[in-house]
Structure formats: structure tokens, C-alpha cells
Amino acid sequence: MLRSKFWSGIRDPLLKNSSRYKFDTVKDFDQLRKEIRAIELELLNSEKPTSIVQHQPISSDSVKLDDILKKIDRMGKRLDTLEKKTPEEAPRTTGNNQFNTGYSRGNRRGNNSRRYGRGNRYQNDRGSNRGVRQPPVRAFMDDMTVTAKTVIEGRWTLEELERMIKWAGMKFKPSKSRSLIVRKGKVQDETFLLAGEKIPTV
């Protein structure tokens, strides 16, 4: 009677299946209870390593998930910082581009002057003729005819322009397409040909 009630009161299906052989063979109630208790302890001990192994991947996954969330949070903060900096740095970038453009134009002008053999000669002559204003020269191609046009930054006399042309190794000869304009003794627009070049036709 006690054996049957005790057996029917076991709720763990694994323990009940494992102890069924003892219930059929052991007739004494106290002995049966000891045997079933021993089986229960064995089952508990065998389940502990399994439970530890099962929980390890879960903890590892949670750590990885936390790391991913932290990285995403840092990336979001960096994006916010970059978005705030972009409008502030845009005017600076525009100013730098304008400076670089002017610098590259200046280099091209200097390279063109050296290309036609005027750089060193002009520098040496300028050193020996200090005190005289000298307009800058810009070289450019015009229908395969090399010409040099002064960039007027002020008012220059005809004598000053003639002096500069001689230093640059050029002939003082206006082209037919661009005439030498002198008003009230001041040159306002002029074009000179390099020595040995043909005058372009209109």
C-alpha cells in the first residue's frame, strides 16, 4: 500500500522510469525509498555538468551582443559628431580651394615664363635696375603664335614698358589683332610679340 502510493507520488518522469526496476523488485517500503533516493542523487549529479555546458554558450552570446551594441552606440556618436563638423568645415574648405586655385595659376605663369627663357634673364636685369616700376608679364598661346601680354595693375608710361620689353628679350611691336592703345601718355592695353615670331594676321 505504502509502496504504491509512494511510487505514484513521484512526479519526475526520468526518476520514475529509472526506478521502475527497483519498484518491481524491492518489496520493503523503507528499502525502496532508499534505493529511489540514491537514484535521484545520481540523476542530479549527472545533470550538473550538462547544465553548465548548456549555460556557457548563452553567457558568451550575451557578451558578444553587449559588445556589438556598444560598438553601434559608439558609431552613432561618431556620425553625430561628423554631421556637426561638416557644416562648420565647409567654408574653410572653400577658402582652401580658392587659395590652391590661385597658387596653381601662379605656378603656371611662372613655368611659362621659364619655358621661354625669360625667367633668369628678367631676374638678373631687375636686380641691376632697381627703382624702376616693372609690370608683370603673362605668356599664352594664340593660333600657334607665342605672345606676351602685360597685366596692368596700375598706370605705366610708354618708356617703362619699352624698358621691360628689352629686359624680357622681346621686340616692341604691337600685333595687328591687338593694337597698342596710349591715352594721355599712359598705356592702357598692349600686346607684344616675342623676338623672331611672326605677327598674326587678322
Image (cartoon, helix red, strand yellow):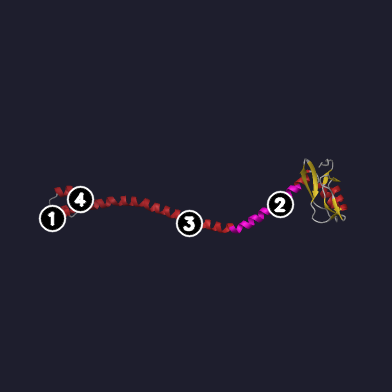
Gap in angstroms between the C-alphas marked 2 and 3: 43 Å
Q: Which mark is residue 114?
A: none
**Is-magenta flag for residue 51?**
no
- How packed mark 3 is, by other alpha carbons closer than 10 Å (few <14, some 14-19, many 20 or more), is few
| Quadrant of the drawing holding the C terminus | top right
- How packed mark 4 is, by other alpha carbons closer than 10 Å (few <14, some 14-19, many 20 or more), is some
Mark 1 or mark 4: whose residue is earlier in sequence: 1
Q: Amino acid at mark 3?
A: Asp
Mark 2 or mark 3: whose residue is earlier in sequence: 3
- Image spot of residue 105 (x, y percent): 72, 50
Going by the image, does 82 lie left or right of 163?
Answer: left
Circle 1 SS class:
helix
**Is-magenta flag for residue 96?**
yes
Residue drawn at the location 51% of the way across and 58% of the way down: 77
Gap in angstroms between the C-alphas marked 4 and 2: 93 Å
Residue drawn at the location 24% of the way across and 53% of the way down: 41
- Image spot of residue 85 (x, y percent): 58, 58
Q: Which mark is residue 73?
A: 3
Q: Mark 4 against mark 2, which lies toward the viewer?
A: 2
Q: Which mark is residue 16?
A: 4
Pointer 2 residue: 103
Q: Amino acid at mark 2?
A: Tyr
Gap in angstroms between the C-alphas marked 1 and 4: 16 Å
The count of marks equals 4
Q: Which mark is residue 2?
A: 1
Taking 83 as reference, is 175 above or below it? above
Mark 4 or mark 3: whose residue is earlier in sequence: 4
Task: Please report the bounds of the magenta region as a residue range.
Answer: 87-110
| Quadrant of the drawing holding the N terminus | bottom left
Query: Main SS type for the magenta part?
Result: helix
Going by the image, does 5 lie left or right of 157?
Answer: left
Gap in angstroms between the C-alphas marked 1 and 2: 106 Å
